[in-house]
Amino acid sequence: MSISQKYAALRDAAIEKFEKTKQKPRVLVGMATCGRAAGAMDVLNVFREEAAKHQLDIAVEEVGCMGHCYAEPLVVISKPGFPSLCYGPVDEGMAQRLVADFLVNDDPCYEFAMAALEPNDEFPTFEDFPRGVVEQRIILADCGLIDPDDIDHYLAKDGYAALSKVLEMDPLAVIAEIKEAKLRGRGGAGFPTGVKWERCYQADGSPKYIICNADEGDPGAFMDRAILESNPHQLIEGFIIAAYAVQASLGYIYVRAEYPLAVARLRTALDQAREKGLIGKEVLGSNFSFEIKIFQGSGAFVCGEETALIASIEGSAGTPNHRPPYPATSGLHGKPTVINNVKTLSYVPHIMRRGADWFKSTGTENSPGTAVFALAGKVVGTGLVEVPMGTTIRELVYDVGSGIKEEKEFKAVQIGGPSGGCLPESSLDLTIDFDSLQQAGAMMGSGGLVVLNEDDCMVEIARFFLDFTQKESCGKCTFCRLGTKQMLEILTDITRGKGNSEDIDLLLELAEDIKMGSLCSLGKTAPNPVLTTIRYFRDEYEAHINEGRCPGLMCKDLISYMIIPEKCSKLCDVCIGSCPTEAIYTRPDMLKAIHLDKCYKCNSCLASCPPQYKAVIRVSPPLVQTEEGGVQNEQQS
């Protein structure tokens, strides 16, 4: 039996199995980490219990992340005669109602539905929303719609068809197709994937290795995790194709141990692929043999760097090494090694199945394809999104993300993770691609995008991200180890009102030294948040230093809380009950006031003050208590 015949048998059996389940109602519950955190496990149990109670012949399945994390828990119900409908957020009570009204009877409860999944005359689809107009899903297309623990769901959607095709091609032809597609690495650097594969293929030395870098460590980033939890076979297929292209015999998926669900689903997926002859000796009856192992990292951010990751697998401390030689020629155990990101490998099956021209039809000339972002921060529609390269930041924030929460003003985006950059409102129409972001002082990174609003202090944001990278520095390079520490100390002083006029120039000087004197990208890019905030928000640095004022009202040492008597209600005591330090008291006229010397500045009073009053405010520069018990501006004291 030929390779294509063996694959066809696997796919046809999966389609037959899948078609049987489609003949009865199906309930898909989003059970990725985001859904579980929102209570999806309880919702899943209710559907199963209610189905048993009503003796319903339905399939209740666990799926991954659909990307609409702002609306978790998400549930999709497909019932013959009705469009497939997505509901969210779903609680236990709504789950009971959906079973009783929709699954038992025929009321689809449109009032609870978010969107339909296919075109119909009854209800709008996700594609009808602004987000759907902008998004173009390739590697996220099946996430949240297939069972990640059932390989037949992936096979029924032509999964592993690209692998079957590739196994009958010459490895150099596979590499040529990836080069023609201009696929650039989605781990951050944007290096041409086909070039990396070609160097490894041509390198002397055997055996050859391939590593999937799933060591996702950026704050606010969850793209790789969601893909691993939602569609692991897509990655595995791309991984095997890459291994065949460079003729590697062993591959490692390097994933952080903090992703237990991703690891569990990967293990299940690998076992199922192995059982069907897709991994192991003579893959699909070919002459190519390949094995995959999972290596769990300990969560060191620096191990996202290729040579540090290799050192970790070899049992050494995860510290980077000088390059060249590059891993493609001398990597794991000194042998030629390809290292690709989760998203990079996930594109490979689509390119090999549909062709390089299809891939290049999306995106820009130098950055074809799509970009996957974890949209987080002060944006309404947080979640996982996939948009064509060349999409603007404005489209991403306002069309895909539905704008800023609480109708606040947009201030900036932190793009590219902790080593990325902060881009201001004037950059909203900047196109998202590798080159444009680099020219603006930021970087694509692995895909984290944090939206900031008017209440954010850009000096504190820079301090926060530098604090992260400084702690994650392996310490090997003096400039990175000590330079980032000195920059952090300066930033901390500025946020505490202890900065001086020379600090900004000193930060710029240190940043350039660290970039030039660091061995790996962690150190070379660590100053980016500081450089971009000084470049675009220098006035905020100057306000901290020269005026002792935090424009974002965020730095604790430079703000105070006060209650406006004219807005305070004599009948309301909410702020008193919310204060953990008993700093709020009732004045003789029954209005409320704050003992500044007792105030911890925890924000509880502001958060709890009823919106009809809005009596609690933050002010900067901070206030001081007078001998008479009143307050005044610190600069006036």
Image: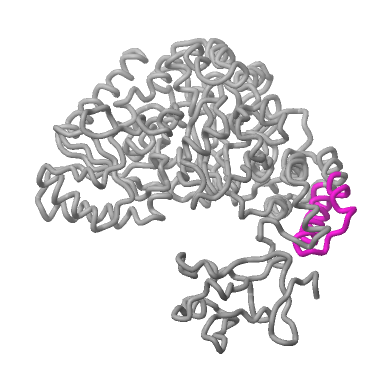
* Of 223 and 554, the residue lying toward us: 554
Residue 565 part of the magenta segment: no
| Residue positioned most to the bottom | 588
Q: Position of residue 580 (x, y in %)?
A: 55, 79
Quadrant showing the C terminus: bottom right
Residue 497 part of the magenta segment: yes
- Residue range in magenta is 480-508
Report the label total: 0
The answer to whether 226 is drawn above or below residue 583 in the figure is above
* Of 590 and 554, the residue lying toward us: 590
Residue 525 falls left or right of residue 116: right
Q: Position of residue 81 (x, y in %)?
A: 14, 32
Q: Residue at x 75, y 52 (%)?
A: 540
Quadrant showing the N terminus: top left
The answer to whether 476 is drawn above or below residue 246 in the figure is below
The answer to whether 588 is drawn above or below residue 166 in the figure is below
Q: Is residue 286 visible?
A: yes
| Residue positioned most to the right | 502
Q: How is the image coloured?
A: one colour
Q: Is residue 336 visible?
A: no
Residue 135 falls left or right of residue 46: right
| Magenta segment, prevailing SS (helix, strand or loop) | helix
Q: Residue at x 54, y 43 (%)?
A: 255
Q: Residue at x 59, y 37 (%)?
A: 446
Q: Position of residue 533 (x, y in %)?
A: 73, 45
Residue 493 falls left or right of residue 461: right
Q: Position of residue 219 (x, y in %)?
A: 59, 49
* Of 135 and 210, the residue lying toward us: 135
* Of 155 and 491, the residue lying toward us: 491
